[in-house]
Image (cartoon, rainbow, N blue to C red):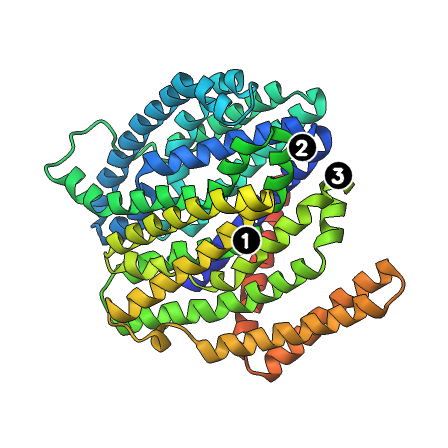
Amino acid sequence: MKQDAGHQAALITTAEFFRFFIKSLIGIILARLLTPADLGSYRQLFLIYSTISAVLLMGIPQSILYFLPRQSPEERKAYIGRLINISFALSVIFALLLLVLRNAIATWFNNPKLSYLLVIYAVYPIFMFSSSLYNYFMLGLSNARSAAKFTLFGVGCDAVLILGVAFWTKSLLYITIAVVASAFLQWLYTRIALRGFPRLQRMPKGFLKTQFSFALPLGISSMIGMLSVQLDKLVISSYFDPAAFAVFSIGAMELPFVSIFTNSVNSVLLPAMSSHDDIPDMAMRYKAAVRKNALIIFPLAALFFLFAEPIFYILYGSKYLVSVPYFKTYLLILPLRIATFGIIFIALGKTKHVMFNSILTLAANLVLNIVLVRQMGMMGAALATVIVTWLSTGVYLLWMKTQLKLRLRDFFALWQVIKTAAATLGAGLTAYLILSICPNRYLAYGAALIAFCLVYLLLGYQFKAIHPYDIELVKSFLLSFFQKKKHATTGMEDNG
């Protein structure tokens, strides 16, 4: 039986938060076990993967969420099989590119170690490309449970292999091998799970044209969007050594909680919005998602801004406190993350708008990065990213009003968002006052955190930003989660 969109999003969000927790734990432990130079090299490997994969996948993941819900049950198996074949071919091209260009990449990143590490790491995309599509297949089939299970399996493999090898050897070379081994196990999981989907078959006439006419603009926009997001890190890598890159990359990131939450919601929202062309219903779904996103994103942004220094000290130690200013700068992006503006254009099939916006964003980001990095150092790269992200959002809003002829008030619960912001501001000021007047630092942090949560909930409910059914939804999901956990435990005891 299919779950409704809210419960699917909650399930995916829970799995992704667990994934974030484990991935963060891996990063924290590696930051303490490795030298800054080795940590920078480790992060550069994943920077290379995320950048090139955005180029080669060409919008295929997003297109799955658009096409798969529109297929008949019989067509879905064949569709999935064809995309597995395509992703494998692209992964082989990726591996060859890493092998051929490894010396040039090492020179660009000012990091000779990458030259031999990329020989090992070249196998990684062969396993991860097709595996990375698995969750999109499951979400396109409205099977959020299978997507969540795979997420948990993947992070479990990473935790056991990467951390085990890191504690045992403290060697970047062996850690890289462990990364590849984890990717192999995830690939094996998806091969078994998708064994009933046919792969060795001919492409029907017009399949590639239909697929890529939709996906190519998305792919170009995804590639450019990824380059825009990673451009600051690519520029820093070209100007500074791996140790400086490690300091910058730890701080120069958006709050991971937010991207997990919004991506989980969007992964469920896009298939629902794409399944029909009912604009009022689409607006209602989108508006509800924006309101709920704001309830979570705004207070998280405020809390992490207030507690950035102790958080970084506890997680990474004193040597990475210099990363805090970059982190606080990136928090200026968070107010925009209550909505994913491009999803409306994708749901309406207007993917060229997404592509043009990404091109504009990349061009502006490139110019600003070059200018500001030369004048301000690494902080210039962070500021450039923030400025360009706000510019990109402004362009989307302008197009929604002028080209799509949509009424923005139908898609954005502006008054509800303002009330949520007011509740967050009141809670933040209360916490700030406590931090300012309390002489005991540890007591101040504890009291400020408790006060923030209480004041936010009180004001949010008083301002009617938090609705009764928001509380009921959280209660329902938590009750369902613990009941399932209890049943699973009982079943294991019975089997034992």
Residue type at mark 2: give it.
Answer: Leu
Circle 3 crowding by C-alpha within 10 Å: few under 14, some 14–19, many from 20: few
Indicate the secondary structure of the residue bearing disc 1.
helix
In the displayed structure, 132 sits above or below 428; it is above
> Residue 30: which numbered mark, if any?
2
Disc 3 on helix, strand or loop?
Answer: helix
**Residue sitting nearer the eye, 102 or 124:** 102
Q: Are marks 1 and 2 in contact (CB under 8 Å)?
A: no
Q: Quadrant of residue 454?
A: bottom right
Secondary structure type for disc 2: helix
Residue at 25% across / 30% down in the picture?
Answer: 199
What residue would you read off at disc 3? Answer: 319
Query: Alpha-carbon distance for marks 1 and 3?
Result: 32 Å
Q: Is residue 360 left or right of residue 172?
A: left
Task: State which mark lies toward you, 1 or 2.
Answer: 2
Of the numbered discs 1 and 3, the one sitting upstream in the chain is 1
Contact? badges 1 and 3 (CB < 8 Å): no
Residue type beneath disc 3 = Lys
- Name the residue: 54% across, 53% down: 14
Is 304 rendered above or below residue 451? above
Q: Is residue 340 visible?
A: no
Question: Quick one: label 2, few (<14), some, or many (20+) residues within 10 Å?
Answer: many
Residue type at numbered disc 1? Thr
Residue 477 in which image quadrant? bottom right
The residue at which mark 1 appears reads as: 14
Answer yes or no: do the residues labelled 2 and 3 have beta carbons within 8 Å?
A: no
